[in-house]
Amino acid sequence: MRSPLRHLRPLALGLAVLLVAAGCSNLPTSPIASSPSTPVASGESQQLLGLEDGLIGSTTTTEATKTIGLLGGTISAGDFTLVVPPLALSRTATITVRQPDPARPVVELSIAPATANGFRIPVLLAGNASKMDRSLVAVACISYWNPTTSKWEPVSGSTVSVATLTVSAPLSHFSTYRVESGGKAGW
């Protein structure tokens, strides 16, 4: 008579292989690993979404380009961080985040191929609002430049974290965005 546990051995082995593979993966939800002697890659921020020091950190790079696939990823440039969740893209695409002037809270987001500019799940754009007047942070939002109307329009779903001094919004497409308060660009 065979042991009733004989079916558990293949299951345990399969689970172990999956755990090892997940531990070695580079998912956007994996911990950020860096040491003082390891330089940060161009466009990557160690202060992702306010998880370190309470802020989205300004990077010295004001433009970053990264290829992101079905598993999603994160890309930062200047005072902005873009988080692409898993399965938001239907194909691998090259994303560029560019803050043309570090003194202004404006970011240009682009994606190639252009046909990938529409997401199954919204991506998250977050901006560092630490340079903004503290009295305006609570009423700040992210807006986008609408080329059809030639006006800045607030992005629905914008949220503010006064605790981490960040402004974020879910995006359904890429365009030019800014952090604003009262219809005027932030800091």
Image: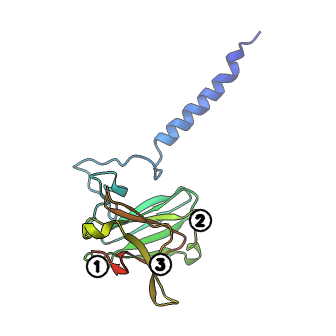
Q: In the rendered structure, find residue 91 and report the number of the disc placed on it.
A: 2
Alpha carbon distance from label 2 to label 3: 19 Å
The kind of residue on which mark 1 rests is Asp
Viewer-nearest of discs 2 and 3: 3
**Mark 1 and mark 3 in contact (Cβ < 8 Å)?**
no
Q: Residue at x 56, y 37 (%)?
A: 18
Which callout, 3 or 1, points at the residue further toward the start of the chain? 1
The answer to whether residue 64 is seen in the rendering is yes
Quarter holding the C terminus is bottom left
Q: Nearer the viewer, residue 142 or 80?
A: 142
Mark 3 neighbour class, 10 Å CA radius: few under 14, some 14 to 19, many 20 or more: some
Q: In the rendered structure, find residue 101 and report the number of the disc placed on it.
A: 1
Q: Residue at x 45, y 78 (%)?
A: 144
Q: Is residue 40 above or below residue 99?
A: above
Q: Position of residue 65 (x, y in %)?
A: 40, 69
Q: In which quarter of the view is residue 125 placed?
A: bottom left
Residue identified by numbered label 3: 175
